[in-house]
Structure formats: C-alpha cells, structure tokens
Image: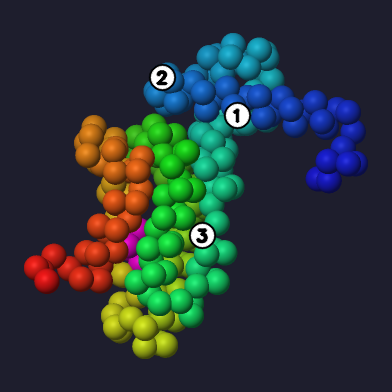
C-alpha cells in the first residue's frame, strides 16, 4: 500500500510488524534459530505474544518472512537481463562479485536458518518455490540463451544451472560446518570469485 495513504492504524501495524521481524532476526543471529520462540520475540520487540500472531500464523511463517529480507535486496534478474552480450568470462566475474556483495550481509542469517529449512517440510517447500526455483530458472534461461548465441558450449542448461547454484549452496553448508577457509573467502569475495570463474573456464589443468 502507498505509505502516503496509510491510516494511523495501518502505520502502527506496519511498524509493529517490522519491529517483530527485526527482533526475530536479532535473536536468530545472536542465539540461532533453535532459540527463536514467540515468547523471546515478544519480549525483544516489547509487544504481547498474541500481537505476533496478528501478523504471523506461526514460527515457520515468521521465518519465511525473515528469508524475504535477504531476497528483497537480490538484483539477480537485473544483472542477468543486462549481460547477455557481455563476454561470458567477464560476465561471470562481475555476476559472482555482485551476488556475493548482495548476499554478504545476509550470509550469517542464511547459515543460521539453513538447519530449520532442511528439517521443516513447509519451510523447505516455501524456500524452494519462492527463493530457489525462480533464481534457478533465470540462470537456466540465461545459460541456454548464451549457448544458442554460441558463447558457451551446448550442454544441459538445467543441469549446468544447478551445478552453478550448487556452488553457493555448498559454500554455505561448509560455513555452517565451521570451515574457516570458506568463512574467510565468503567475507572477502574477490579471491573466491576469481577461483570459481577460473575453475569454470580453465579447469584445474596446469597452463
């Protein structure tokens, strides 16, 4: 709704919702998603526990909204649409840098939420449908178009997109497992980007 035409009650409801989400994010980042309870969120947000249920039906619904916070700043579609005529090697360097830059502020949140997503059927379905599948389809179409233009060798674009996305997912899992090298690389981005693109285009053979 246009903020200009919101009633006072709607503005208060909006502010309360944001306060609840921010409190849930802070608790999750500080303690982990296992310690995220409606009681804790209510205490942190300074609202009645029942107030939370006016905005979210349950904990899973609240977590789904927390995932949306990371998604809102994602500019993947814009980057892919503008880059089809760029050199593939240069494009993937820029694309990965942009993606890591966009995701970096949310990496700890994503890592914190990952166990809950994996163990909750409803959350996993939401994550796959709302967050994973649209990005996967965009990347698949992008790769397919580059193959048709002769910029990339022809192969199964759907599988290639999943392999490409698997790099992100795998790195997040490794950070979740406590891999310090991955944590350091994700916080930096440049060395990691160069390594991924080098492996994609040159492989591991010595020059």
Quadrant in which residue 16 is drawn:
top right
Q: In this view, does 57 lie above or below 164?
A: above
Q: What element carries label 3?
A: helix
Whole-Å distance between the Cαs marked 1 and 2?
A: 15 Å
Disc ID at residue 21: 1
* Total numbered circles: 3
Circle nearer the N terminus (1, 2): 1
Within-10-Å neighbours for mark 2: few <14, some 14–19, many 20+: few
Whole-Å distance between the Cαs marked 3 and 2?
A: 30 Å
Q: Residue at x 59, y 27 (%)?
A: 22
Circle nearer the N terminus (3, 2): 2
* Residue that carries the numbered disc 3 in the rendered image: 76
Q: Which of 31 and 186 is in front in this view?
A: 186
* Residue that carries the numbered disc 2 in the rendered image: 31
Q: Which x, y percent locates residue 42?
A: 61, 15
Q: Is residue 35 above or below residue 205?
A: above
Q: Of helix, strand and loop, which mostly describes the magenta segment? A: helix
The magenta stretch is 161-165
Residue sitting at the far front:
207
């Amino acid at each position: 709704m246009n903020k200009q035409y919101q009633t006072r009650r709607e503005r208060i409801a909006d502010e309360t919702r944001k306060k609840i989400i921010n409190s849930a994010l802070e608790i999750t980042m500080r303690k982990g998603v296992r310690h995220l309870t409606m009681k804790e969120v209510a205490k942190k947000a300074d609202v009645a526990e029942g107030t939370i249920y006016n905005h979210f039906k349950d904990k899973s619904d609240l977590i789904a909204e927390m995932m949306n916070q990371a998604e809102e700043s994602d500019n993947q579609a814009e980057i892919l649409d503008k880059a089809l005529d760029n050199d593939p090697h240069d494009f993937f360097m820029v694309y990965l840098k942009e993606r890591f830059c966009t995701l970096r502020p949310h990496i700890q949140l994503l890592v914190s939420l990952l166990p809950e997503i994996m163990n909750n059927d409803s959350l996993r379905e939401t994550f796959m449908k709302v967050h994973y599948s649209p990005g996967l389809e965009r990347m698949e179409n992008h790769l397919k178009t580059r193959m048709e233009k002769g910029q990339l060798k022809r192969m199964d674009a759907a599988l290639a997109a999943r392999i490409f996305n698997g790099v992100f997912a795998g790195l997040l899992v490794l950070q979740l497992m406590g891999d310090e090298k991955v944590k350091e690389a994700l916080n930096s981005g440049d060395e990691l980007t160069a390594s991924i693109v080098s492996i994609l285009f040159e492989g591991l053979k010595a020059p």
